[in-house]
Image (tube, helix red, strand yellow):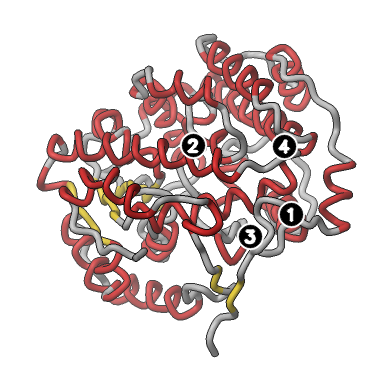
Amino acid sequence: MSAKTIRINDLGNPTLSELQRQAIANAPEVTMDETAVLNEARNATGLSDFGAEDFRERLRIWLQSFDEDHDLGPLGRASLFGDAVRYAGNRLRLEDLLKRHPEIIDEPIDRPIIIAGLPRSGTTYLVNILAADRRLRSMTLWESMEPVPAADDKVIVPGEDPRYTRTREAWGQFEQILPLMPAMHEMAPDHVHEDIELQALDFSTYLPEWLARPYRWREYYHTHDQTPHYAYGKKVLQALTWLQGPNRWLMKSPPHMENLLPLRATYPDATFVITHRDPLAVLQSAITMIAYGDRIRRQRIDLKELADYWIERIEGLLRACVRDRDSMPKAQTIDVLFHEYMADQKSVIRRIYAMADMPMTKDAERHIDLHLSANPRGRHGRVIYDLENDFGVDIPALRERFGFYYDRFPVQQEIV
């Protein structure tokens, strides 16, 4: 059976459902204030030690950026405030765990497999396929939302981690409010998620850019070396390993593409998998998804501003990758072209395994095949994207702007 075709015709001027209107109306009023965020995190966890204090500057810039985004609506503001509280709470729990168990810092992370690539370039699909191999440790959505369990957490559903329960309920509600989202990016609680959440505990990540237009934060992020924040993220990974092994990790995150050197410095024995796809196809998929979500986050949706923001953002990712790619160790780095991967997934997987020095066992192949058959692409529907007509983008001009990337990596052009 072919997947149903979905065309979203109201991206710039959405017609809200009753459920969407209710969600916006019920959003609490928040003040983008550092003290308010940290006090809520303290109250939620019963803890008070955040560790090194330098994160406060980054938190303040986040909050100031959100205040300066005047088109954010009440639900958008409340969601961003809530995320900041969650990251601060996760940091409190991590620092408490490290204080009680300092041996965690000695926990080895053994030759991780790390996927870097543009958002919407197949990284999520690839990481979930590889995660079917049970020899690898990976980070599910529910675990990324709350990496460190609370000591006094109460089981809600028998036999189910309460963090899983909360994530399932939260994302279930989210997908009820935005029912087309699974067709663009499914967020099932047990799916493998991005390790971008590791750096979020240190308040240095591009996550807010998916939910707002935080220009001040984007500028700050680009002018600061991310190596110390990758080092902080490694502490989270060590804690997760100590809580539950094994210690050979599989991870992925789009910002790795612009942080290849911090990534290499933090995980020098890793296998680095860099995915490449036509950036125009990436852009139209990403901004269509963001615009669809913006109907509940923003009071006014400026599609041209959204396109311009992410054209610059994608260009930054690409330029950094082109700049640093040849500095990566040849014996540990593999480039994966999207069109080749889609044509022969098993061949690409075998190449990754060979570079990672992991034998493809019969058991691993069986689990990978089971995952592939159970999770075909487009099973929730196929969204029709239109970069030119929906967002007013000049396709030839943009292709010329990204010419430096096409010259370096032979990606297949997907938009004519």
**Residue at the spot of label 3:** 181
Earlier sequence position, callout 3 versus callout 1: 1
199 sits to left or right of 364 = right
Check disc 1 and report the residue beneath it: 14
Q: Amino acid at mark 2?
A: Tyr
Sequence-wise first label, 3 or 4? 4
Task: Pick whichever of labels 4 and 2 is earlier in the sequence.
Answer: 4
Q: Residue furthest bottom?
A: 1
**Residue 275 falls left or right of residue 143:** left
Q: Nearer the viewer, residue 337 or 54?
A: 337
Q: Earlier in the sequence, mark 1 or mark 2?
A: 1
Residue at mark 2 to residue at mark 3: CA–CA distance: 21 Å
Q: Residue at x 54, y 35 (%)?
A: 209
Q: Amino acid at mark 4?
A: Gly
Image location of residue 275, percent across then percent down: 29, 54
Q: Amino acid at mark 1?
A: Pro
What amino acid type is highlighted by mark number 3?
Met
Residue underneath mark 2: 309
Residue 146 image offset from top left, x and y in percent: 62, 39
Q: CA distance from mark 3 to mark 4?
A: 16 Å
Left/right of residue 279 with respect to residue 203 in the rendered view: left
Is the C-beta separation of discs 4 and 1 under 8 Å?
Answer: no
Q: Nearer the viewer, mark 4 or mark 2?
A: 2
Q: How many marks?
A: 4
Select label 2 or label 3 by which is in front: 2
Task: Quadrant for the N terminus, please.
Answer: bottom right
Residue 100 image-quadrant placement: top right
Q: Nearer the viewer, residue 84 or 13?
A: 13
For mark 4, does the 10 Å Cα neighbourhood hold few (<14), some (14 to 19), or many (20 or more) residues?
many
